[in-house]
């Protein structure tokens, strides 16, 4: 019996960490052939060059798709989606996959799903059914309606996909593949590398032995013109703490120029001696950095997903993760420096939260590969085993 060709499109730094263990499981599976497409900001150095991590992990990349227009505003986001749709259609025509896997809720995810759908290629959506703020939720639900098989992270997400009208038998709870990596890190949590020596970055080096903060704050697409003011509130909040701060650059979204400019102006004006900036890390290194931190601050989903599993205190700022299921590790605040600082202090008072397996048990990658091998994928919304 010929192997089923599964084309996975990875388009951003977070997308790779969300799907890596599934890629490994697909590669190992005797009934599957992995076709890997790397696109968009995953190829760009200024956004962390996730492609280097992909190659480091030994994956063969079948196609690279350059599709990001400069500008980081609403117009360039829309046009980049169109470029992606056009370029990915050519890639799919060349690869002739039996199914295309798309991840989560970004504009590149939408381009992937539309291109495959119009070419009568079954679409598999990982992480559908979740509720978040901004335009991302609209994109996620639109991709759900374009998809044939839904591999979701939680039972509540499964129920949402079914309420959107998808046949119940096409919706499978696999857990989130990023939790697989978190499980490996939880088993060996020691910070066994020097992040400054290994990843460079910008800013002074610091002694991390007495605690540190990790910050990852992205612009909110529907509030993109407020991005600079919002990040400044976070920057001034963290100056109230005598702790090193390890800050990661934002995603390529409308408003990211404002976020980046706010960080650069703050560094020039205040010349902080405790702030170090990184572009990217291997997923397991990043999670080890998190599990040994005092807290994570910002609006990244990693604070909600992986950090709930790892029991890392999280201060979630603003509306970007609004409505997403969360564990007891999260305190939600507005873009207000006093509220952000107060939440960090509150976490110090509470102590370390218990681990929460809300988003999975560490075996999602194998479940995803098994579903892809067994599902009778067709362009009709039916699934049998």
Image: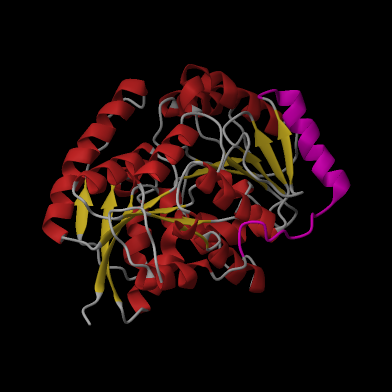
**Identity of the residue drawn at 42% across and 69% down:** 371
Image position, residue 382 (x, y; %): 37, 58
Q: Relative to 207, does residue 256 appear above or below in the rendering?
A: above
Whether 342 is among the magenta residues is yes
Q: Is residue 198 visible?
A: no
Q: Relative to 231, does residue 86 appear above or below in the rendering?
A: below
Q: Is residue 50 visible?
A: yes
Foreground pick, 244 / 259: 259
**Identity of the residue drawn at 83% across and 39% down:** 346
Image quarter where the C terminus lies is bottom left
Q: How many marks?
A: 0
Image quarter where the N terminus lies is bottom left
Foreground pick, 360 / 346: 360
**Identity of the residue drawn at 21% across and 79% down:** 2
Image position, residue 11 (x, y; %): 34, 48
In the image, farthest residue toward the right: 349
Colouring chosen for the image of the structure: secondary structure
Image position, residue 287 (x, y; %): 58, 59
- Which stretch appears magenta? 335-360
Q: Relative to 258, does residue 111 appear above or below in the rendering?
A: below
Horizontally, is 271 left or right of 64 in the view? Answer: right
Horizontally, is 323 left or right of 91 in the view? Answer: right
């Amino acid at each position: 019996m010929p192997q089923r060709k599964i084309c996975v499109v990875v388009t951003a730094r977070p997308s790779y960490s969300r799907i890596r263990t599934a890629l490994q499981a697909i590669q190992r599976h005797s009934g599957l052939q992995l076709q890997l497409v790397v696109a968009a900001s995953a190829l760009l150095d200024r956004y962390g060059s996730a492609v280097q991590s992909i190659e480091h992990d030994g994956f063969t990349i079948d196609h690279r798709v350059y599709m990001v227009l400069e500008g980081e505003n609403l117009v360039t986001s829309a046009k980049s989606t169109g470029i992606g749709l056009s370029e990915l259609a050519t890639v799919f025509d060349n690869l002739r996959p039996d199914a295309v896997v798309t991840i989560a809720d970004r504009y590149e995810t939408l381009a992937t799903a539309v291109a495959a759908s119009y070419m009568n290629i079954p679409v598999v959506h990982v992480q559908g059914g979740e509720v978040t703020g901004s335009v991302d939720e609209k994109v996620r639900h639109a991709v759900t309606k374009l998809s044939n098989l839904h591999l979701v992270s939680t039972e509540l997400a499964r129920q949402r996909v079914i309420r959107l009208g998808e046949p119940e038998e096409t919706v499978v709870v696999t857990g989130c593949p990023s939790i697989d990596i978190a499980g490996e890190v939880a088993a060996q949590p020691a910070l066994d590398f020097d992040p400054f020596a290994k990843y460079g970055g910008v800013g002074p080096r610091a002694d991390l032995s007495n605690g540190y903060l990790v910050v990852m704050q992205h612009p909110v697409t529907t509030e993109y013109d407020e991005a600079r003011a919002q990040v400044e509130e976070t920057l001034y909040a963290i100056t109230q703490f005598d702790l090193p701060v390890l800050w990661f650059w934002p995603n390529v979204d409308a408003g990211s120029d404002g976020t980046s400019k706010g960080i650069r102006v703050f560094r020039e004006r205040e010349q902080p001696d405790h702030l170090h900036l990184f572009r990217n890390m291997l997923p397991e290194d990043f999670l080890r950095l998190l599990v040994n931190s005092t807290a994570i601050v910002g609006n990244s989903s990693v604070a909600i997903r992986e950090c709930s599993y790892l029991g890392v205190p999280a201060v979630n700022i603003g509306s970007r993760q609004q409505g997403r299921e969360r564990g007891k590790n999260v305190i939600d605040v507005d873009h207000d420096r006093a509220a952000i600082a107060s939440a960090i202090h509150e976490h110090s008072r509470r102590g370390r939260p218990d681990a929460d397996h809300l988003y999975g048990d560490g075996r999602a990658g194998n479940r995803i590969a098994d579903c892809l091998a067994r599902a009778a994928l067709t362009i009709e919304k039916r699934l049998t085993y």
